[in-house]
Amino acid sequence: MMGLIGKTWRPALLLLSALAVFLSLRYFYFGGSYGAPEVAKIAYESITPPSSSFSTFSEVAPVRSGLLVVDGAHGNLFRMEEVSVLLSRVADRGYDVDFIGRSLRRFGSQGDFDILNLGERLHLLSEKLRQADSFVVVLPRDPYAKAEVDVVQDFVAKGGKLLLIADPTRPQDIDSLAKVFGIAFEADYLYNTTEYDINFQNIFVRGFREDEITRGLNKIVLYTAGSIKSTGTGLAFTDAATQSSLAVGRTESFYPLAKGSDPHVLAIADLTFMIPPQNSILDNDRLIANIADFLTESDRSFDVADFPHFFGASVDILLGGDALFDVATRLKSLLGTLRIESEIQGFEDFTKDTVFLGLYRHASDVVQYLNPAGVLVSETVRTPFTPELPTGGTALVLLNQTSERRVLVILGDTPAALLDMVERLASGAYRDGLVDPLLGVYRTQ
């Protein structure tokens, strides 16, 4: 009987023991008393519930040709899938996409990465931008050195397009490049506590200035946006209810999209709106398409230092005389290694890009290209940029370009001098003799 009673009361005793432990812990942590926090009073009528709205986007992409280069040599903190929609739109427009290096700290990814010192980075940047039409820099963790900034400035000055993308939730040093274009990415994030998509950091933007970037936009969503200060033009601006974490309580418009002091530079303080599936919300896809148009509508100009990237896919090699055939063969081989097809021709096709190889005595065959540049060849070589030079032991390179074609003229006193110039073109050493962006003069002995 006693055993039966013990079994009956055992659960009750265990429950009483647990209650005693709970009361002891409550007293220890809360000093013997506990009051539940007051329920916040929310004016529900002032809050718009989450309203993600997917949209269907289609386009007939214009077909162009060119090259977009993406920076991956400055510890850039982005994943490939985060820019895949934008890069796909660029590729749909006929552009090739290439990368500089590979990110060292891409969210702790494991694998083989390029460890580049400044000299290597500078060389890669220079070589890639000589052939590029547009350049994209996303969240560089490592700062741009002054020499690198100078290369990018020269690229933009030639009409190259530059896209700068930041994100306030990730560490980056994008201002080391952006500041020379009058752009500063603020160390803030934008939020709206009364109208938002999913949470208060997902802000709606309805205010747009008329521009190629904002064409056809009514409403977009940015998911972790910051603000931009620029000496250029702000393109998208927030409403009065949107606040900055650095300017709480201030009623003003903030700009998450802006052009720089040069209209070829576009800055965006948000990466997430182009990441699937956010790219399909409202007019986000239209914005991405407009950015792709911006990057592929190039008016980039080239000079001699950009050899051979000012040429199209094929080039004619025109000779001043048969004795230069071996030099032409070496040049043809060089162009082939640079993925440019070429043919040695005996007559000039005025519809095609051309390299003219000739001795100084053949200068009369290309006087139509020499005269506009102020170059006169007789017993001496005269240019607007150098003292009068003897023809012996010298050579010159001149680029003549129109909207239809490019002609590179290479003249020297002997076949050996011309072969020397081809080798300088191969190594890049010819850039040391440039006296003007379109003209180089050299001593070959």
Image (tube, grey):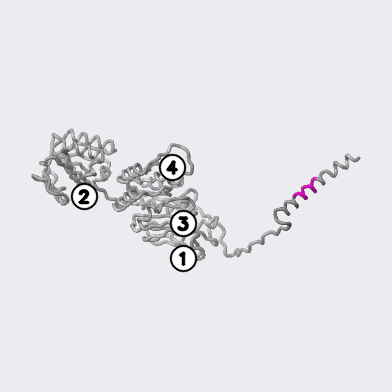
Residue in the image at 51% along x and 55% along y: 53
Q: Secondary structure at mark 3?
A: loop
Mark closer to the chain start, 1 or 3: 3
Q: Which residues are magenta?
A: 14-21
Callout 1: few (<14), some (14-19), or many (20+) C-alpha neighbours within 10 Å? some
Give residue 198's position: percent from left, percent from top.
55, 55
Q: Which residue is mark 4?
A: 104
Mark closer to the chain start, 3 or 4: 4
Give residue 216's position: percent from left, percent from top.
41, 58
Task: Write down the quadrant of residue 324 in the picture.
Answer: top left
Say which amino acid is labelled 2: Asp
The residues tagged by marks 2 and 3 sit, at their Cα atoms, a distance apart of 42 Å
Q: Which residue is mark 2?
A: 436
Asked if the residue under mark 4 is in contact with the one under mark 3, i.e. CB atoms within 8 Å, the reply is no
Between residues 251 and 61, which one lies in front from this camera angle? Answer: 251
Quadrant where the N terminus lies? top right
Q: Which residue is mark 1?
A: 252
The residues tagged by marks 1 and 2 sit, at their Cα atoms, a distance apart of 48 Å
